[in-house]
């Protein structure tokens, strides 16, 4: 399931702080605007995305309903001059699978002669396939 999670980015002293007002709150309900940070907006957004996924994963694990997400209009009155509102689009199932490193068993069909040569060289098929897929998808 996809979620468009609102985030607020605050620039202060050359650093970009980021939070999700729907998840990153103090006990009194006020927003913790300094949950994570980055030297660039992209870095702050990536960092807050990880924080949000971990929070949402906790909700899922504890069978707690994910809170209703704020709209742009609702947040507009809460931001100051040095803050911007943005949204992070998350595929929750995909992101949680990355966090948990869930594994999927796949059947691969190879010519017998190639399988024999690879086994003789003690090639780890799983690692090689993962490496090749990451390279093909241009991810680290």
Image: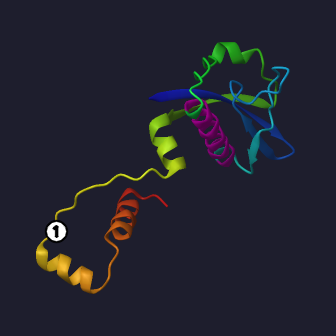
Residue at point 16%, 68% (across, down): 110
Q: How is the image coloured?
A: rainbow
Which residues are drawn in magenta?
A: 43-60
Identify whether 22 is placed above or below 104: above
Out of 40 and 63, give the one closest to the viewer.
63
- The residue sitting at the front extreme is 62
Q: Which residue is mark 1?
A: 110
Residue at point 74%, 30% (across, down): 24
Residue at point 54%, 48% (across, down): 99
| Left or right of 71 on screen, residue 16 | right
Q: Please state the horizontal and vertical placement of residue 105, each as a whole percent of the image.
A: 31, 54
- The residue sitting at the left extreme is 112
Q: Please state the horizontal and vertical placement of residue 113, each as a whole percent of the image.
A: 13, 79
Q: Main secondary structure of the magenta part?
A: helix
Q: Please state the horizontal and vertical placement of residue 130, each as a whole percent of the image.
A: 38, 63
| Left or right of 124 on screen, residue 16 | right
Residue 126 in the magenta stretch? The answer is no
- The residue sitting at the bottom extreme is 120
Instruction: Name the quarter where the N terminus is drawn.
Output: top left
| Left or right of 1 on screen, residue 62 | right
Out of 55 and 11, give the one closest to the viewer.
55
Residue at point 62%, 35% (across, down): 58
Identify whether 136 is placed above or below 52: below
Provide the secondary structure element on which disc 1 rests: loop
Out of 2 and 85, give the one closest to the viewer.
2
- Total numbered circles: 1
* Local crowd size for mark 1, using a 10 Å CA cut-off: few (<14), some (14–19), many (≥20): few
Q: Please state the horizontal and vertical placement of residue 120, each as a whole percent of the image.
A: 25, 86
| Left or right of 42 on screen, residue 112 | left
Residue 44 in the magenta stretch? The answer is yes
């Amino acid at each position: 399931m996809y979620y468009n999670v609102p985030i607020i980015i605050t620039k202060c002293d050359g650093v970009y702080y980021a939070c999700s007002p729907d998840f990153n709150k103090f006990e009194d309900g006020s927003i913790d605007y300094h949950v994570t940070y980055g030297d660039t907006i992209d870095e702050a957004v990536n960092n807050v995305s990880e924080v949000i996924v971990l929070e949402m994963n906790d909700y899922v694990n504890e069978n707690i309903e994910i809170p209703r997400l704020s709209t742009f209009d609702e947040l507009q009155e809460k931001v100051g001059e040095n803050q911007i509102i943005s949204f992070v689009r998350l595929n929750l199932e995909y992101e949680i699978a990355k966090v948990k490193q869930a594994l999927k068993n796949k059947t691969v069909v190879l010519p017998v002669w190639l399988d024999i040569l690879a086994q003789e060289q003690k090639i780890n098929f799983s690692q090689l396939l993962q490496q090749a897929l990451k390279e093909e998808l241009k991810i680290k």
